[in-house]
Amino acid sequence: MKCLIIAAGKGRRLQQRGNSKPLIPILGIPLIERVIRAALEAGADEFYVVIGYRGEQVRDFLKQLAERLAIPITPLVNEDWEQENGVSVLQARGVLHEPFLLLMADHLFDPDLVRSLITLPLGDGEIALAVDGNTRNPLIDMGDVTRVRMEDDGSAESKKIRDIGKGLADFNGFDTGIFLCSPAIFKALEQSKEKDGDTSLSGAVRVMAAAGRAKAILTDEFWIDVDDSAAFRKAEQALLKRLRDKPGDGPVARYLNRPVSVRISRYLAQRDVTPNQISLFSFLCSVVAAGLFALGGYFALLVGGVLAQFASIIDGCDGEVARLKYQSSDFGGWFDAVLDRYADAFLLFGLTWHLLAASANGWILLAGFMAIIGSFMLSYTADKYDHLMRERIRAGGKAGLRMGRDVRVFLIFLGAVANLVLPVLVLIAVVMNLETLRRVSIARNA
Amino acid sequence: MKCLIIAAGKGRRLQQRGNSKPLIPILGIPLIERVIRAALEAGADEFYVVIGYRGEQVRDFLKQLAERLAIPITPLVNEDWEQENGVSVLQARGVLHEPFLLLMADHLFDPDLVRSLITLPLGDGEIALAVDGNTRNPLIDMGDVTRVRMEDDGSAESKKIRDIGKGLADFNGFDTGIFLCSPAIFKALEQSKEKDGDTSLSGAVRVMAAAGRAKAILTDEFWIDVDDSAAFRKAEQALLKRLRDKPGDGPVARYLNRPVSVRISRYLAQRDVTPNQISLFSFLCSVVAAGLFALGGYFALLVGGVLAQFASIIDGCDGEVARLKYQSSDFGGWFDAVLDRYADAFLLFGLTWHLLAASANGWILLAGFMAIIGSFMLSYTADKYDHLMRERIRAGGKAGLRMGRDVRVFLIFLGAVANLVLPVLVLIAVVMNLETLRRVSIARNA
């Protein structure tokens, strides 16, 4: 599906953040790149971007983005970018002859929103607008949003737009700025201009609504119009919030580590740091922590424990930054897992050494060894045939997968701080190996 | 595709091995079950079996096999089972009205052979016979095999059968007993009986060949007619030989362990032992070996080393028996891998303990720990995202995957026998961790 993106305006109210609005980075990625990435994910594969204010800058960026993502992006120039946004849409008249997606460079959204819009059957000469039906949506700037009045059109999937405009007193939804258009939109734009002297996109939608050709599809997915500094901050918060609900997170990760790591990721995303560098840094912190454990003495133990927990928190940032900046990769996930296994083993070995230095006792050695192997087995049992076994283990009770690395390192941290190393070592040894045994039994019965 | 199997004959020359030939087990599985399993794997999904001699026994077995495999198997009774095999084929006349696969209950074959036969486009009223073109095939009993004379039919996939029969002096292939038939075969059987008084299947093929309707497809896949004790032994050897060429086997597995484990599997397959029981037994042997290591003293070390290597050999039998007896399962592979990881760790911990008992030295502890974690990482790096990473590691040079468990345990064995425990521990620690590092670099560059 082709996709038209309007990126011609000046973005006056965000000028303190950058000269060209589409290029203003939010958590390290320019607005327009976020819009293109999300549309790509939703199924669009050919892009036309209307540029205007500081068009050269945007054009240069789009050129390198097209190369980087290996997708076609064609810039269309709107010399009259100071006029209403309908003029920008009209620039695409010559190139779009079939239904297309119409997006705004400053409206961020969840790809699922566009996915459901694309699947809507569009009649000849119709347009469809994604409308936010939540009139209390806190992400919306009530003073500036375009309002929509819809009524039932007899179908379950869509409604009929009656009117649209910023000043509408009687409304039941908000314009998300995300459209599925047939080329009929171009004619409506001209009619609106000729009849009412209105060159806005809303004007054209009003023309089509009057002809009964403007549909609305209700959505409750995430979207936000990044129009001023307040909206920018809200958008940042919304993007960060989505990182915190990662399925598969254990209790320590969810309630203790994520709230901190997300804040750190917000900082890191805006710097030139790759997720793999973060993984490596977290690993090195664990190695130093293990070394402090082995050094002996409570003070080193205490600092090591805190450092181990800090490393565990940082260990969440690699994935968060990767997701924020579209840098997720198979290698990244694998590399992180491999480093985590080494880190776990080093930490437990450090604790074992700490104890053995005080008293060379065979039972301590055995406890340390069993803790190391148990921790390993917990990862191994889920990761060997991971496509198959994770599901089975999950089906056998979620507790199993929650006994992850976050809990393990947190126990190490507590043991070090409370100077209760041996009990923690024994606890990890017993719990991890029992859980492995439980998994064998689950897998056998599945 | 429907499949007709002839299982009516007496099998006089194999009577010392069982009363009913189709039910004679070869490596623990009755001949007819092997034929049905192989046909199933090749794409057949509905079975008709002509029974005769000791028909009740065969019928009972087929009933429980149908339940066990959840496939339809219909027995057809041939009262005149003492006559030629064409009479048996005629029993299916009422039930088979479209092209079908025709097999003999005592002819074992590789599923690929049937797969290539099934894909042959069969003209209306034609039959096709899989013909072995290797006139020096050592699996063939030259005194008894049915010979085939073929000539070119102008196509690349098939040839034309000119004549068929046991006494043929001028021949260029052998009848494998594996046919793709149209129902025209039934008419040919009757014609052959009326004209020549010949009730054999070969007679019908001769009739169809005379009409230019008998094709041959050349094959070099495994097949064998299990007709007498000599053929039975050859078939056993051929099935066992196929176990020895497992892709992914390391050098110790291939040249030292497999030749021994295959012999043990031959014995175990004929007993009531499951692959998982074998995995568990091998694991317990490793645990005892580790205990002997920890005991201290050269004699315990020596016995432990030999036992560890024995466990590694037995560790091949679980997979071999599973493949021989169609008992492979996801759980089985996973369970074996999990036990192997524990076994590796125990063995290395046993060696470490052995050394520490003699001199409590931090370097020994470190070497033992690094050997344990390195061994683990070698499995983990290949098994995390196994669908993805194995290929990458393989692409980065086969040496990596060859550094498997077989080599590890063999080194342990050598170290114990030669009383060179510390050098072996250090060697394993260095090699395994370096290989892990190499894999990280391979995966990153992929």
Image (spheres, coloured by chain):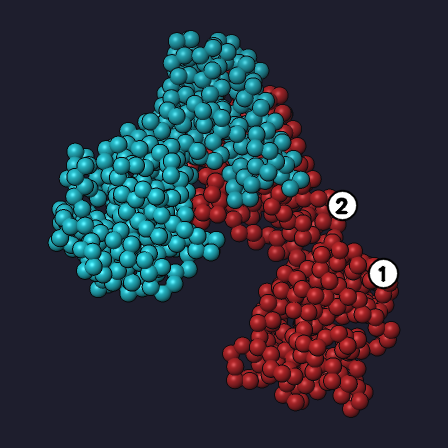
Chain colours: A cyan, B red
Residue A2: image quadrant is: bottom left
Outermost residue, bottom side: B195
Q: Residue at x 56, y 26 (%)?
A: A432
Tell me the kind of residue under disc 2: Asp
Q: Residue at x 35, y 44 (%)?
A: A171
Q: Is residue B47 left or right of residue B20?
A: left
Q: Nearer the viewer, residue B81 or B21?
A: B81
Q: Secondary structure at mark 1?
A: helix
Residue A309 percent across, percent down from the top left: 41, 21
- Residue A257 drawn above or below residue B434: above
Q: Residue at x 18, y 41 (%)?
A: A11
Quadrant location of the C terminus of chain A in the rendered image = top right
Q: Residue at x 39, y 54 (%)?
A: A160
Disc 2: host chain: B
Tell me the kind of residue under disc 1: Gln
Residue B394 percent across, percent down from the top left: 44, 48
Asked if marks 2 and 1 fall on the same chain, the answer is yes
- Residue B228 drawn above or below residue A243: below
- Between the residue at mark 2 and the residue at mark 1, the CA separation in whole angstroms equals 21 Å
Instruction: Identify residue for label 1.
Output: B57
Residue A232 percent across, percent down from the top left: 26, 35
Does the image show residue B354? no
Outermost residue, front side: A169
Residue B334: image quadrant is: top right
Instruction: Identify residue for label 2.
Output: B272
Q: Which mark is residue A152?
A: none
Question: Which sits earlier in the primary sequence, circle 2 or circle 1?
Answer: 1
Residue B292 percent across, percent down from the top left: 63, 25
Does the image show residue A6? yes
Disc 1: host chain: B
Q: Residues within 10 Å of mark 2 (few under 14, many from 20)?
A: few
